[in-house]
Amino acid sequence: MSLTLVNGLPAHVLFVHFVIVLVPLSALALVVCAAWPKAARRLGLLLPVLALVTLATVPVSTHAGEWLERHVGSDPLVRKHAELGDGLLPWVLGLFVISAVIWWTARRSAPAADGTAGASSWSSSALVRGAVAIVAVAVAVGAVVDVYRIGDSGAKAAWHDNYSKTATQHGDD
């Protein structure tokens, strides 16, 4: 298996499904953890690891998509899809960075074994938590909207003029 073909089929078609699932999942986890410090402490390292895995899927999908783009005819819809796809990486990088910040801060503010507060007071600083939550929501929404736009343009590129708007007879109906 290569990063361009899987069982003789373009790998991009498979890899994008990881992006389609993981970006909204990471975005949701990020917003929940940003708004609810207890959730950030409970998820612990899972939050930034999920965001890192999500981040890794984007260049893999993009690489496979660039290969596919070179192997299909020139089409303005494919070019638009490719241009939109190139814009996802900064959003997902933002998801990862903010996830790491929230994890680090929640980890430092976890109550000590004796019940005293941790090194910083993440949970008690409403101003800081509010600012982080606003940034997290903005990046999460941006990432999810971008995934939607990219997916919509990819579906249009793949399916335009490739199906009949009326049902066809197959003889066994």
Image (cartoon, rainbow, N blue to C red):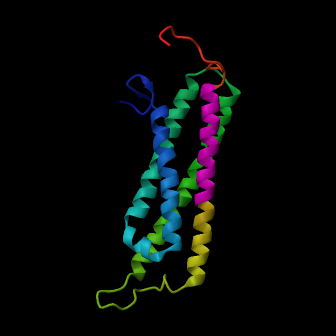
Q: Find out whether residue 102 is within the magenta segment.
A: no
Q: Position of residue 137 (x, y in %)?
A: 60, 64
Q: Is residue 73 above or below residue 170?
A: below
Q: Residue at x 48, y 65 (%)?
A: 99
Q: Residue at x 58, y 59 (%)?
A: 140
Q: Is residue 85 above or below residue 34?
A: above
Residue pushed farthest left?
113
Q: Is residue 44 visible?
A: no
Residue pushed farthest front?
173
| 63 left or right of 82 in image | left
| 73 left or right of 31 in image | right
| 117 left or right of 92 in image | left
Q: Position of residue 16 (x, y in %)?
A: 50, 39
Q: Which residues are magenta?
A: 140-159
Q: Position of residue 32 (x, y in %)?
A: 50, 67
Q: Residue at x 65, y 18 (%)?
A: 166
Residue pushed farthest top?
171
In the rendered image, the quadrant that contains the N terminus is top left
Q: Is residue 56 visible?
A: yes
Residue 107 placement: quadrant = bottom left
Foreground of the two, 48 or 158: 158
Please, what is the dominant secondary structure of the magenta stretch? helix
Q: Position of residue 142 (x, y in %)?
A: 63, 55
Q: Residue at x 41, y 22 (%)?
A: 8
Q: Is residue 24 above or below residue 133?
A: above
Foreground of the two, 64 or 47: 47
Residue 148 placement: quadrant = top right
Callout count: 0
Q: Find out whether residue 152 is within the magenta segment.
A: yes
